[in-house]
Image: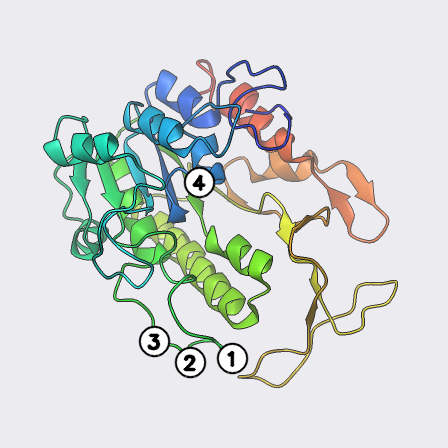
């Protein structure tokens, strides 16, 4: 939205008034828009591009709003009928209400609804027949992070037989690319945050690798289907979680180190979000404007940009009626 608000509030200002997000602006000028996440589709970050609520935990309300929205793509976890091992179970309506699921399954929501990994793969392969898809991955909360088993090293616990973030990302791009006016999409490796809260080192690596693969998939898609003169890719985070650093850090940040193929020497110093600066990577059309706006100075990290500035650039410079 380009505006700061109170913690736990989604798409509204500090008084609870609804704010326009950059997806809504894109839609208002004829572009397509969507959200993709490795965690529930209406968790805080994807919800911020598709809902408005003073309580981030009003999950059913935000799910209903997103289902009723004009978004073209909603992909994520949060399936009532599956557990975190991608195994069917008795329905638990934590993220999506029974009425919301019935609406999606009935075909009356306006979305082409699916909940199987094969359709994600089919869309990623370019077999697209609709301009609006709601894809609910067959897992309860996360694609992989919450599966059973204790992970001492990345990959030592077999993964669920469920789609991954790179496949979901490519699928979303293929759907949105049907719009000749262009599109905006928010793609989140949301389970990285969940591993930080839980201080799960091995799964933090797994989730970061999955996100890196999704970034590579997006870059490959741009080079195959678009170009860097008309497309901007921004890779960043909303915050750091877990205060991950070297062992016995002391007063200054301590680098992580260790042999290849093993977890680096490290330590978690928090189970919550921290105020550390996070990286911002930009490539393509408009990247120069983002770099130029990084006009604040941190004594350790150097130049940085306020998180609202990127949204303001989108709303005021790029996604405007004049600049569409």
Q: On the rendered structure, is 47 left or right of 306?
A: left
What is the distance, in whole Å, between disc 3 and disc 1 at their CAs?
Answer: 12 Å
What is the distance, in whole Å, between disc 2 and disc 1 at their CAs?
Answer: 7 Å
Q: On the rendered structure, is 164 left or right of 131?
A: right
In the rendered image, the vertical position of residue 9 relative to residue 177, given as above or below: above
- Answer whether labels 2 and 3 touch (C-beta < 8 Å): no
Local crowd at mark 3 within 10 Å, few (<14), some, or many (≥20)?
A: few
What is the distance, in whole Å, between disc 4 and disc 3 at their CAs?
Answer: 26 Å
Kindly tell me whether residue 85 is visible in this rendering. Answer: yes
Instruction: Please report the residue visible at 55 percent of the width from the left and 67 percent of the height from the top.
Output: 200
Q: On the rendered structure, is 114 left or right of 221?
A: left
Secondary structure category for the residue under label 4: loop
| Mark 4 / mark 2, whichever is N-terminal | 4
Residue 158 is tagged as 3
| Mark 4 / mark 1, whichever is N-terminal | 4
Instruction: Please report the residue visible at 31 percent of the width from the left and 51 percent of the height from the top.
Output: 168
Instruction: Give the residue pinned by disc 4.
Output: 43
- Answer whether labels 2 and 1 touch (C-beta < 8 Å): yes
């Amino acid at each position: 939205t380009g505006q700061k608000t109170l913690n736990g509030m989604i798409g509204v200002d500090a008084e609870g008034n609804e704010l326009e997000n950059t997806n809504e602006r894109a839609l208002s000028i004829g572009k397509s828009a969507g959200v993709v996440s490795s965690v529930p589709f209406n968790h805080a970050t994807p919800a911020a591009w598709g809902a408005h609520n003073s309580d981030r935990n009003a999950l059913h309300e935000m799910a209903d709003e997103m289902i009723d929205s004009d978004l073209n793509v909603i992909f994520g976890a949060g399936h009532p009928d599956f557990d975190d091992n991608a195994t069917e179970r008795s329905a638990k309506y934590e993220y999506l209400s029974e009425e919301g699921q019935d609406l999606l399954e009935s075909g009356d929501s306006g979305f082409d609804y699916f909940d199987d990994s094969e359709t994600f793969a089919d869309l990623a392969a370019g077999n697209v027949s609709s301009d609006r898809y709601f894809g609910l991955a067959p897992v309860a909360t996360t694609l992989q992070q919450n599966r059973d088993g204790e992970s001492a090293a990345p990959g030592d616990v077999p993964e669920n037989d469920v789609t991954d973030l790179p496949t979901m990302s490519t699928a979303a791009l293929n759907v949105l690319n049907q719009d000749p006016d262009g599109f905006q999409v928010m793609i989140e490796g949301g389970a990285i945050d969940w591993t930080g809260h839980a201080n799960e080192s091995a799964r933090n690596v797994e989730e970061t690798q999955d996100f890196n693969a999704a970034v590579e998939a997006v870059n490959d898609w741009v080079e195959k289907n678009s170009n860097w003169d008309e497309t901007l890719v921004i890779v960043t985070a909303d915050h750091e979680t877990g205060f991950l650093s070297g062992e016995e850090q002391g007063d200054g940040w301590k680098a992580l180190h260790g042999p290849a193929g093993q977890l680096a020497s490290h330590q978690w110093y928090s189970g919550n979000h921290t105020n550390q600066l996070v990286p911002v990577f930009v490539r393509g059309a408009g990247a120069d404007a983002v770099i130029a706006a990084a006009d604040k100075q941190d004594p350790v990290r150097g130049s940085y940009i306020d998180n609202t500035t990127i949204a303001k650039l989108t709303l005021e410079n790029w996604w405007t009626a004049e600049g569409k």
